Structures are given as structure tokens and as C-alpha cells.
């Protein structure tokens, strides 16, 4: 016996990836429906060998459906997620709307699966920010061993984090550089993204950090441990898919790099590729389409008493969004619903 599943925002990049991953991981689906806004109504999306025609989100009745995977913006989620939850359908939300709500669990299944029982307060579970999700998968097993005091992270985030419009802008600008008569000014990003990097993701806050940087701080604390200090610099780079992070970690206890490497090799969701030779590390191009979070460049930081550096790479459309949401659904099935 399986589940009746709703994918909300099925025509977007994350929505399509949700359908792909549900099929790839053979999630127990008895019935599935793809929902979209009226402007995309009737569009076709793939679910394995099936073709689904999208239905209207505005008029859909969530009664009798088990799980709704939401991949729409916060404004629309604010309207439709409570309707689904009230109808008895458990919402797994990819937007930022509920991440910081104390009555909504923020889940990365490799890190805090036990927190999923808190869904019952609102019938909603939040999916973390893409840059946070991959980092906490790497931090948690190390924190369990030596207790993390402080994290300094610099991100190198792909344009797909800004949706299909971000991908199109990088593609169009790259082509225009070789065709000077076809100028493509920045519209999605604040400056030219082709052959450039932009140290600005989301809006600026009063203290000079950006909202993306604040998210990494707040979400790491909620998911792992409120005592961990985090400082982040988030940068958009001209990569289509795959987020990378340079992570500096300060521990309360000494942790040898070899032991850290062994710990990470045994940790769920992680693949360690760490050879000290040309090409002995993973780059974003190589992680696309993979489920794993890849860790490379593990080394001692001699400038602090108990420090390590590492390089963390993951497909942001997968672990940073769709994969994590499907893993939440799997965890929900095993720990709470116990069907399938």
C-alpha cells in the first residue's frame, strides 16, 4: 500500500526534479497529481514512463491526499499550504516560509530525522535552504564526535538556485559576450553573471549580511545545535547546477584530519573524494544528477587550536531541494505514517 501524492509547482525546475526523484527512488505512490498555476494549466510533465497533465492549484481539493510536496514561492505557499494541511494532507515545503517557525520542523533526514514528529502541530514540514542542506550533512557527524564551536563558510552557488530564469540569464549573457551586437543586461542578478562572480544572494539586511547568509546561520542552529556560531559569505558563480562551499570548522576538541575523513566516509549521504593530487577532488560539474554530498580537501587548520577545512559540493536541485524533500517523505513514511 502506497501514498496519494501531490506535487505543487510541477512545471518548475524543482517540481520536475521532485517527479524524477520520486520515480528514481521508487517512492511508494498509489496515485500522483501534478499541480500548477493557471498560466501553466494543461502543461505536461513526466513521472517515470507516465505523462501527467497539470491540474489547477487554485481549485484543487487536498482532502484524501496523504503528502503534498510544495515547490512554489512563499507568497503562493502562504495561501495553499494551510489549505492542504487543514484538509489532512501533510505538506513538505521547499520555500522559506515555514523554516523559522518554531512549530514547524526543519528537516535534513541524515541529520535530525527524529524532529519529524513535530509535523503534527501544523501538518507542515520545512525543507532547508539549498546551501544549508549540504553543509549540515557534513557538519553533523563531525559535531557528534568533537562538538563544533564555530563555522566560517564561503559559498559558490550556481545560477539554478535562482530558478530557470537564472539559468537562462547565464546562458544568454555567455552567448552575448561572443556577439557584441546582442547585449544581454542583468535582470535576474544584480550584475553580469557570465564570466563573473557576485557576492550577493537575496536581499541585504541591516547588519550588512544578505538574507542568504542569515539563512545559513539560523537554519544550521535550528537543525543541529543552537550553540554553533556560523558566519557565511554567499557568492553567486557562473555555474549552471551544483553549489560548492569552502568550510572552516573550529571544534571544542581536537579532531585529526584522518579521523575526520574516516567519520565522513561512514556518514549517511556523503561521498568522500579526497586525493592530494591533480583532480583528486569533486567539482560542481561532476556532482550534477547525483544524490550524494561530496567532500574533498579535508585538512587541518593550523591557525586555530582545533580546526579543519573542507570542500563541500552537491547538486542544489537535488540535495538542496527535491531530493531532501523526497527523503523527508520517506522518513515520514517510516517513522510516522508507516505505509508503503
Image (cartoon, rainbow, N blue to C red):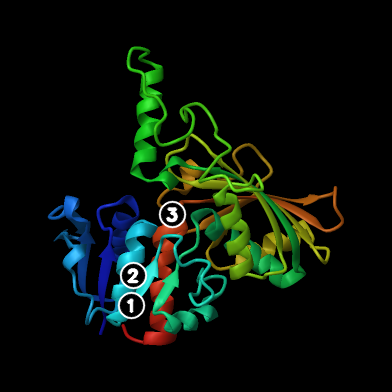
Q: Nearer the viewer, mark 3 or mark 1?
A: 1
**Secondary structure found at label 1:** helix
Classify 10 Å Cα crowding around label 1: few (below 14), some (14-19), many (20 and above).
Answer: many
Alpha-carbon span between mark 3 and mark 2 = 29 Å
Residue beneath the point at 75% across and 69% down: 147
Residue at the spot of label 1: 85
Residue at the spot of label 2: 81
Residue 328 position within the rendered picture, expressed as x and y whole percent measured from the top left: 43, 72
Are the residues flagged by discs 3 and 2 in contact, CB closer than 8 Å? no
Residue 112 visible to the viewer: yes
Classify 10 Å Cα crowding around label 2: few (below 14), some (14-19), many (20 and above).
Answer: many
Residue 199 position within the rendered picture, expressed as x and y whole percent measured from the top left: 58, 37
Using the rendered view, name the quadrant where residue 172 is placed. top left
Residue at the spot of label 3: 290
Report the number of numbered marks.
3
Mark 3 or 2, nearer chain start: 2
Amino acid at each position: 500500500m502506497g501514498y496519494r501524492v501531490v506535487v505543487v509547482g510541477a512545471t518548475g525546475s524543482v517540481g520536475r526534479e521532485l517527479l524524477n526523484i520520486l520515480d528514481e527512488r521508487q517512492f511508494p505512490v498509489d496515485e500522483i497529481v501534478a499541480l500548477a498555476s493557471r498560466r501553466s494549466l494543461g502543461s505536461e510533465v513526466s513521472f517515470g514512463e507516465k505523462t501527467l497533465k497539470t491540474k489547477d492549484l487554485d481549485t484543487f481539493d487536498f482532502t484524501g491526499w496523504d503528502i503534498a510536496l510544495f515547490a512554489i514561492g512563499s507568497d503562493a505557499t502562504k495561501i495553499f499550504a494551510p489549505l492542504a494541511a487543514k484538509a489532512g494532507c501533510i505538506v513538505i515545503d521547499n520555500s522559506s516560509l515555514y523554516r523559522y517557525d518554531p512549530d514547524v520542523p526543519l528537516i535534513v533526514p541524515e541529520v535530525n530525522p527524529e524532529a519529524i514528529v513535530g509535523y503534527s502541530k501544523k501538518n507542515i514540514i520545512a525543507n532547508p535552504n539549498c546551501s544549508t542542506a549540504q553543509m549540515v550533512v557534513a557538519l553533523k557527524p563531525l559535531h557528534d564526535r568533537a562538538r563544533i564551536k564555530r563555522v566560517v563558510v564561503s559559498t559558490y552557488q550556481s545560477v539554478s538556485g535562482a530558478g530557470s530564469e537564472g539559468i537562462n540569464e547565464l546562458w544568454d549573457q555567455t552567448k552575448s559576450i561572443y556577439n557584441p551586437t546582442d547585449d544581454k543586461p542583468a535582470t535576474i542578478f544584480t550584475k553580469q553573471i557570465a564570466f563573473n562572480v557576485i557576492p550577493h544572494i537575496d536581499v541585504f539586511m541591516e547588519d550588512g549580511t544578505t538574507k542568504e547568509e542569515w539563512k545559513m546561520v539560523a537554519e544550521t542552529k535550528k537543525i543541529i545545535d543552537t550553540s554553533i556560531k556560523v558566519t557565511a559569505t554567499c557568492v553567486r558563480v557562473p555555474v549552471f547546477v551544483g553549489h560548492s562551499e569552502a568550510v572552516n570548522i573550529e571544534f571544542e576538541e581536537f579532531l585529526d584530519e584522518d579521523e575526520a575523513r574516516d567519520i565522513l566516509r561512514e556518514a549517511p549521504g556523503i561521498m568522500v573524494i579526497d586525493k592530494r593530487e591533480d583532480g583528486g577532488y569533486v567539482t560542481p560539474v561532476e556532482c550534477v544528477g547525483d544524490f550524494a554530498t561530496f567532500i574533498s580537501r579535508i585538512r587541518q587548520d593550523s591557525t586555530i587550536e582545533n580546526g579543519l577545512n573542507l570542500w563541500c559540493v552537491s547538486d542544489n536541485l537535488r540535495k538542496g531541494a527535491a531530493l531532501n524533500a523526497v527523503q523527508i517523505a520517506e522518513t515520514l513514511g517510516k517513522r510516522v505514517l508507516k505505509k508503503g
